Image (cartoon, helix red, strand yellow):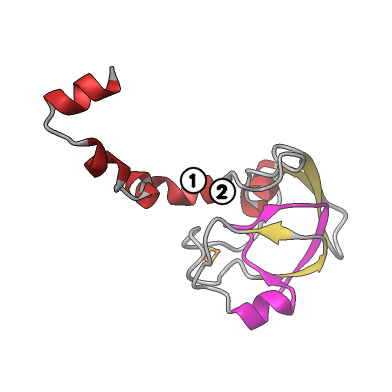
Amino acid sequence: MRRALTSAAGITSKATESVPASYFQNSRLMGKVQAHSIPLSTRMKTFRIQIDGQAVDAEADSETSLFTAMTRAGIAWPVSCRNGTCRTCIARLLKGKVRYEIPWPGLSAEEKQEGYCLPCVARPLADVVIVPA
Ligand code: FES
């Protein structure tokens, strides 16, 4: 069947064998593939968000940003761009771990290592405790 189709299309078997696998990768889907490359065991788990110094809690699954979860819980948090660039929402992560869909421009690698995070785009990987930065 394959031979008949490729022959009808004028494609030689040598030509089909030389197409690199990367030809079939869809670059538009790469971000989504990365987003779902987190371990299955952490996907859609529910995590607790605590704001240090306040008696408030929020819950977020691994696909919900900290800011969205806090808003749903009625917690007021400064926000502006909601896309990880303006730093209005910047917080210090005292406990826990977060992930980002892409390396957002609003935080340097050093700031991430020092525990800063952007709640508008950060998604929890564990229970977290944050404070305004
Ligand atoms: S609101 Fe702009 S970086 Fe979070």
The residue wearing badge 2 is 35
Give the total number of marks visible in the rendering.
2
Q: Evaluate if marks 1 and 2 touch, with contact meaning CB atoms under 8 Å apart.
A: yes
In the figure, 83 relative to 113: above or below? Answer: above
Q: Which residues are magenta?
A: 109-133
Q: Quadrant of the C terminus?
A: bottom right
Q: Secondary structure at mark 2?
A: helix
Q: Residue at x 77, y 46 (%)?
A: 58
Residue 31 pos. (x, y %): 47, 51
Q: Amino acid at mark 2?
A: Ala
For the residue pair 108 and 60, the one nearer the viewer reads as 108
For the residues labelled 1 and 2, the Cα–Cα distance comes to 5 Å
- Asked if 44 appears above or below 53 in the picture, the reply is above
Q: Which mark is residue 32?
A: 1
How dense is the environment of label 2, judged by Cα within 10 Å: few (below 14), some, or many (20 and up)? some
**In terms of secondary structure, where does tag 1 sit?**
helix
Q: Quadrant of the N terminus?
A: top left
Vertical comparison of 11 with 25: above or below:
above
The residue drawn where x is 28% and y is 23% is: 2
Kindly give the residue lying farthest to the top in the view shown. 1
